[in-house]
Image (cartoon, grey):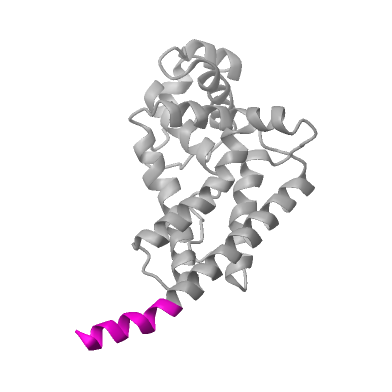
């Protein structure tokens, strides 16, 4: 029997789990957790009712795994590199942004993960805390570390956190503001080339702002030292 206690991080271990996760993702994103019925999920996945209990324990266990799958690219959760790939901070930032955009809108990605996460952000369930800690917090911490290194402030500094939130906000608008974008910019399409363009824009736009903060912080240090000597 599969080890139900071993964390999957949303990554299916076999073809049956993959079918159940995909079917459950569609059902949960359409109806929400409470209204979703296990029998509908199993019918959509082409498995019997016992399959959910066998692979995930129960409906809540299945929902936990679906949320993890929706929050991260399959196979990426356990392998996330907090250092971020790239030779420069701007390149690291671009790679980070592009990875999230491709996860949300890549050619092979279904539409339901974004819909499900939109529901969850609006009305978080108890399962969401685990997703934040296991999936979102490591990425958030990586962005904060990158920002801190550029602007010359500690990772827990208020300015560091505000800058990190601004960067993440630019990414989130493309996910959870999609319907607004359709109306404001009807010609906008999430093509692979567009995702590259967005990632480059967010990275260059954000990095220019971070460098501005860095210059401001560097200029303020002599003044702070002078004031300290006077005291």
**Quadrant of the rendering where the N terminus is positioned:** top left
Q: Residue at 45%, 17% (x, y): give it.
A: 50
Image position of 96 with respect to 54: above or below: below
Image position of 80 with respect to 115: above or below: below
* Residue closest to the eye, 163 or 75: 163
* Residue closest to the eye, 43 or 170: 170
* Residue closest to the eye, 137 or 167: 167
Q: Extreme front residue here? A: 230
Q: Is residue 227 magenta?
A: yes
Q: Extreme bottom residue here? A: 229
**Quadrant of the rendering where the C terminus is positioned:** bottom left
Task: State the image coordinates of residue 230 (x, y, percent, origin top left).
Answer: 23, 87
Report the span colored magenta. 219-231
Which of the 4 image quadrants contains residue 122? top left
Q: Quick check: 25 left or right of 217?
A: right
Task: State the image coordinates of residue 43 (x, y, percent, origin top left).
Answer: 57, 12
Residue 85 seen in the figure: no
Image position of 29 with respect to 129: above or below: above
Task: State the image coordinates of residue 14 (x, y, percent, origin top left).
Answer: 56, 36
Q: Quick check: 22 left or right of 195?
A: left
Residue 220 seen in the figure: yes
Which of the 4 image quadrants contains residue 58? top left
Q: Residue at 72%, 47% (x, y): give it.
A: 195
* Residue closest to the eye, 28 or 147: 147
Q: Residue at 62%, 73% (x, y): give it.
A: 87
Q: Residue at 54%, 28% (x, y): give it.
A: 21
- Give the prevailing secondary structure in the magenta stretch: helix
């Amino acid at each position: 029997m599969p080890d139900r206690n071993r964390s999957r991080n949303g990554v299916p271990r076999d073809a049956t789990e993959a079918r159940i996760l995909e079917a459950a993702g569609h059902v949960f994103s359409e109806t929400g957790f409470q209204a979703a019925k296990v029998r509908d999920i199993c019918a959509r996945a082409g498995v019997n009712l016992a399959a959910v209990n066998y692979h995930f324990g129960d409906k809540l266990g299945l929902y936990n795994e679906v949320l993890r799958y929706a929050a991260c690219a399959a196979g990426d959760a356990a392998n996330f590199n907090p250092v971020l790939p790239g030779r420069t901070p701007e390149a690291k930032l671009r790679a980070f942004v592009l990875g999230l955009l491709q996860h949300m809108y890549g050619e092979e990605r279904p539409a339901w993960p974004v819909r499900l996460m939109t529901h969850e952000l609006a009305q978080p369930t108890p399962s969401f805390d685990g997703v934040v800690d296991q999936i979102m917090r490591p990425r958030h911490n990586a962005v904060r570390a990158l920002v801190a290194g550029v602007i010359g402030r500690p990772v827990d500094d208020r300015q560091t956190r505000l800058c990190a939130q601004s960067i993440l906000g630019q990414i989130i608008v493309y996910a959870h503001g999609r319907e607004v974008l359709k109306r404001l910019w009807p010609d906008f399409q999430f093509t692979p080339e567009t995702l590259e363009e967005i990632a480059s824009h967010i990275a260059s736009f954000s990095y220019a702002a971070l460098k501005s903060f860095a210059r401001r912080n560097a200029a303020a240090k002599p003044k702070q030292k002078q004031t300290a000597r006077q005291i």
